[in-house]
């Protein structure tokens, strides 16, 4: 396949409409997690607590969705949202950390998808075990590179496949919701209102489920990441909100209807994916088979969406001079080939490291979470910053109302992400710095290529000191045993 260097004339950018952008948002959010929601919630709370938890999480993430919508409309010239918002609002270095962190989170997260696929197939192929055997690693490796070849064929083709997969994975979930409603037992549902036998106080129930909802919505920023491909920049905001509301409705429905099929204690004891056990209780063994197939399709769809977004962020950062320029190499099919190759190689390395971890799935999932939250914080903080500084707002009454609204959105979204970071814990943030700090070599190479000073300000010195200091603490902690992966 022919490729062009970033300095050469570039091929026409493929344009995606609201439907395709919404599919990217939904595809990246609806992955493996939805199939485990019944058991995860039932282990902590009942119907009332679940409704409260989804209301809190939904409100916080809706503010993040509105954040990306507002920024897409107010700053339409900025591509690859999570990266460009951090760069424009807080400087090149933090823009790099945001881009690399988001890219790394996508690559690491993709490993969790393949571990889960191999684990699910392990029910029929014993050699795959729980997804952490040598045959499973070989299968996951094959999956990584087959997807690379698919996306390399072109953005339009990959987006078309993503639309089909998004519909294919949502249909079984809708079937689950409809069947669960059909067989819903009012007495069982009423008995589950306050949770299982040892549910505890309602406040503790809600707090226990909040971490379940924390990472369910990662991917809400998907349309903004792919903003340069939007037919109209207003499509970015529309797709973000539409995709988020659709996914919120699906997640909440899956959780609530399950309480009408089985007692909470029985749901909590189900083998994952717990949705399979609930549907099996409702209709028999074919229900579990349907959910298992749907899970594999859903995970493949989420993996494809995250592969697209990971390469896009790195390409945009390289085009802007914050990654080495080789990552801005574009193929004749409008695919950032080197960025895509780098994403696949990175995921392959993480897959090997995860294989030697005590809990490959948990290790990859935790690291994904820690890496992904900081870019979201920068995006929310950028909206808050421009609203406070009146950047781009006129003196008329309509502009004043917009500013007041976006000030509230930015403040709530920023506070919510800080809450999520605190929930993730200091240990995970420190471990993530082991990945982030050495990556600054890429930043310095890019600065040198573009004849820019390696250190732009005293603030950069502070940021680098914190990053490398935290990485050293994490390495010492791993060596001493008070940190673990």
Image: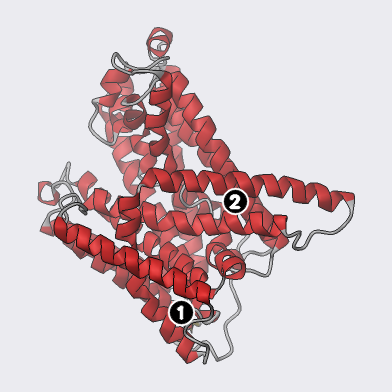
Which one is earlier in the sequence, the residue at label 2 or at label 1?
2
> What numbered label is drawn on residue 240?
2
Regarding residue 1, the answer to whether it shows in the image is no
Quadrant of the image occupied by residue 472: bottom left
Determine whether, in the image, residue 468 is placed left or right of residue 461: left
Q: In which quarter of the image is the N terminus?
A: bottom left
Quadrant of the image occupied by residue 390: bottom right
Q: Position of residue 380 (x, y in %)?
A: 58, 54
> What numbered label is drawn on residue 392?
none
Q: Nearer the viewer, mark 2 or mark 1?
A: 1
Vertically, is 474 above or below 7? above
User: In what element is the residue under mark 2?
Assistant: helix
Residue at which label 1 appears: 323
Instruction: Identify which residue is drawn at 41% across, 86% down.
Output: 445
Q: Residue furthest right?
A: 396
Q: Which of 400 and 84 lies nearest the eye of the viewer?
A: 400
Instruction: Identify which residue is drawn at 42% across, 35% down.
Output: 210
Determine whether, in the image, residue 459 is placed left or right of residue 39: right
Decide: marks 2, 1 in contact (CB < 8 A)?
Answer: no
Q: Where is residue 370 in the image (x, y as percent from the top left)?
A: 37, 54
Vertically, is 85 above or below 32? below
Tell me how the rendering is colored. secondary structure
Vertically, is 237 above or below 263? below
Q: Where is residue 396 in the image (x, y as percent from the top left)?
A: 89, 54
Q: Position of residue 427 (x, y in %)?
A: 30, 52
Q: In which quarter of the image is the C terminus?
A: bottom left
């Amino acid at each position: 396949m022919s490729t062009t260097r970033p300095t050469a004339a570039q091929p026409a950018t493929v344009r995606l409409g609201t439907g395709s952008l919404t599919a990217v948002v939904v595809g990246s959010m609806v992955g493996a997690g939805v199939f485990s929601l019944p058991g995860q919630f039932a282990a902590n709370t009942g119907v009332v607590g679940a409704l409260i938890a989804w209301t809190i999480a939904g409100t916080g993430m809706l503010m993040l969705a509105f954040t990306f919508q507002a920024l897409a409309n107010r700053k339409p010239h900025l591509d690859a949202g999570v990266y460009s918002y951090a760069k424009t609002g807080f400087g090149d270095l933090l823009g790099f950390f945001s881009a690399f962190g988001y890219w790394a989170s996508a690559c690491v997260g993709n490993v969790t998808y393949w571990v889960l696929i191999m684990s699910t197939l392990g029910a029929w192929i014993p050699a795959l075990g729980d997804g952490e055997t040598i045959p499973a690693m070989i299968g996951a490796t094959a999956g990584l590179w087959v997807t690379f070849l698919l996306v390399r064929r072109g953005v339009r083709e990959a987006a078309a496949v993503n639309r089909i997969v998004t519909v294919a994975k949502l249909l079984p979930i809708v079937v689950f919701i409809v069947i669960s409603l059909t067989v819903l037992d009012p007495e069982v549902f009423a008995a589950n209102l306050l949770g299982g036998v040892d549910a505890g106080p309602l406040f503790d129930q809600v707090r226990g489920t909040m971490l379940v909802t924390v990472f369910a919505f990662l991917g809400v920023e998907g349309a903004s990441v792919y903003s340069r491909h939007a037919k109209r920049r207003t499509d970015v905001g529309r797709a973000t909100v539409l995709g988020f509301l659709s996914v919120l409705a699906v997640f909440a429905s899956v959780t609530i209807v399950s309480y009408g099929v089985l007692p909470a204690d029985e749901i909590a004891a189900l083998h994952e994916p717990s949705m399979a056990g609930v549907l099996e209780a409702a209709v028999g063994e074919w229900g579990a088979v349907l959910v298992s197939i749907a899970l594999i399709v859903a995970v493949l769809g989420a993996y494809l969406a995250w592969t697209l977004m990971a390469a896009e962020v790195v390409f945009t950062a390289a085009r802007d001079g914050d990654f080495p320029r080789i990552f801005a190499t574009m193929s004749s099919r409008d695919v950032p080939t080197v960025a895509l190759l780098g994403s696949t190689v990175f995921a392959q390395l993480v897959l090997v490291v995860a294989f030697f971890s005590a809990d490959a799935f948990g290790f990859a999932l935790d690291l994904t979470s820690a890496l992904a939250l900081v870019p979201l914080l920068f995006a929310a903080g950028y909206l808050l910053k421009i609203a406070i500084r009146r950047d781009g707002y006129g003196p008329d009454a309509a502009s004043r109302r917009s500013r007041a609204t976006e000030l509230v959105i930015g403040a709530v979204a920023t506070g919510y992400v800080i809450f999520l970071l605190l929930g993730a814990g200091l240990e995970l943030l420190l471990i993530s710095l082991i990945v982030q700090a050495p990556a600054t070599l890429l930043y310095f190479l890019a600065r040198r290529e573009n004849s820019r000073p390696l250190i732009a300000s005293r603030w950069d010195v502070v940021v680098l000191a914190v990053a490398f200091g935290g990485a050293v603490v994490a390495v010492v902690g791993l060596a001493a045993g008070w940190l673990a992966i």
